[in-house]
Amino acid sequence: MQLFLDSAGLRRKVEKFRGKETVFGQGDPAKSVMYIQEGGVKLRVVNETGREAVVAVLGPGDFLGEGCLAGQSICMATATTIAPTTMLVIEKDEMIRVLHEEHEFSDRFIAYMLARNIRVEEDLIDQLFNSSEKRLARTLLLLARYGAQGQPQKVLPKVSQEMLAEMIGTTRSRVNFFMNKFRKLGFIRYNGEIHVNNSLLSVVLHD
């Protein structure tokens, strides 16, 4: 996708963010699309009673803020970096222009959004029907970009057990228990940074 962004004649600017920096807040005006080049971002939402949940963690190659293209006037979540992050920022009108004029880029972007929607549906099914252990294994594989184009990244962006617990809907103590289990079985190496091995996939596939 980076090559298509470079070749489409797209006007954009590069912005760099520190770790744990807010990119945009829930309720802010939605006016641009962002593409992550390096680093990572977590999206979290807060409901009317103040309950908070992490709904996604995005990494290099992911877009965010694309809801503005579908008419969203405000941001539906708060985006916060989980590591030093570099993004391309594309104004809404410019993104719409290029999607209309550059058909190959438009096809790639639509394919990306369809794949993203499938992943959201899978996340919902995962939350409804799978155990906390399977949800944690699947989340770690997704963070490692398993199944994405190119080689999976073995070392995950810095993500705390608290954040993992929020993402899969369980407690930090349960996450800690499963992380230790995965480490003992050789599925991960965990020493401040999380190194994911392909063998972790067996947890997701096991009935």
Image (cartoon, helix red, strand yellow):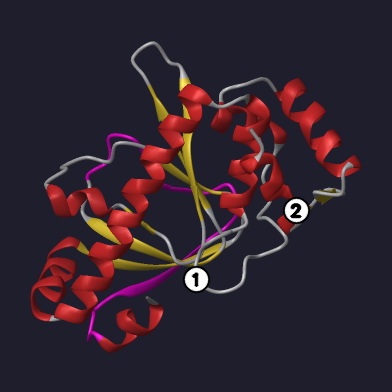
Res 44 seen here: no
The numbered dot on residue 199 is: 2
Whether residue 159 is visible: yes
Q: Amino acid at mark 1?
A: Gln
Residue 3 figure quarter = bottom left
Kindly give the residue lying farthest to the front in the view shown: 207
The first of marks 1 and 2 along the sequence is 1
Residue 114 location (% of width, % of height): 28, 55
Q: Marks 2 and 1: in contact by CB < 8 Å?
A: no
Residue extending furthest toward the right: 184
Front one among 29 and 108: 108
Tell me the residue that label 1 is attached to.
149
Is residue 129 left or right of 157 when viewed as pictured?
A: left
| Extent of the magenta region | 8-29
Q: Which is more foreground, mark 1 or mark 2? A: 2
Amino acid under label 2? Ser
SS of the residue at dot 1? loop
Query: Distance between the Cα atoms at labels 1 and 2?
Result: 19 Å
For the N terminus, the image quarter is bottom left
Q: Which corner quadrant of the image does residue 50 belong to?
A: top left
Q: Position of residue 56 (x, y in %)?
A: 47, 42
Query: Is 12 left, or right, of 49 in this rendering?
Result: left
Please say if 151 is above or below 180. below
Percent coordinates x, y for residue 203 in the rendering: 69, 40
Whether residue 90 sits left or right of residue 131 in the image: it is: left
| Residue in view at x 52 percent, y 58 percent | 59
Residue occupying the point 19% across, 72% down:
106
Q: Quadrant of the C terminus?
A: top right
Secondary structure beneath dot 2 equals: helix
The crowd level at tag 1 (other Cα within 10 Å; few <14, some 14-19, many 20+) is: few
Q: Within 10 Å of the Cα at label 2, are there few (<14), some (14-19), or many (20+) other Cα atoms? A: few
The front one of 148 and 130 is: 130
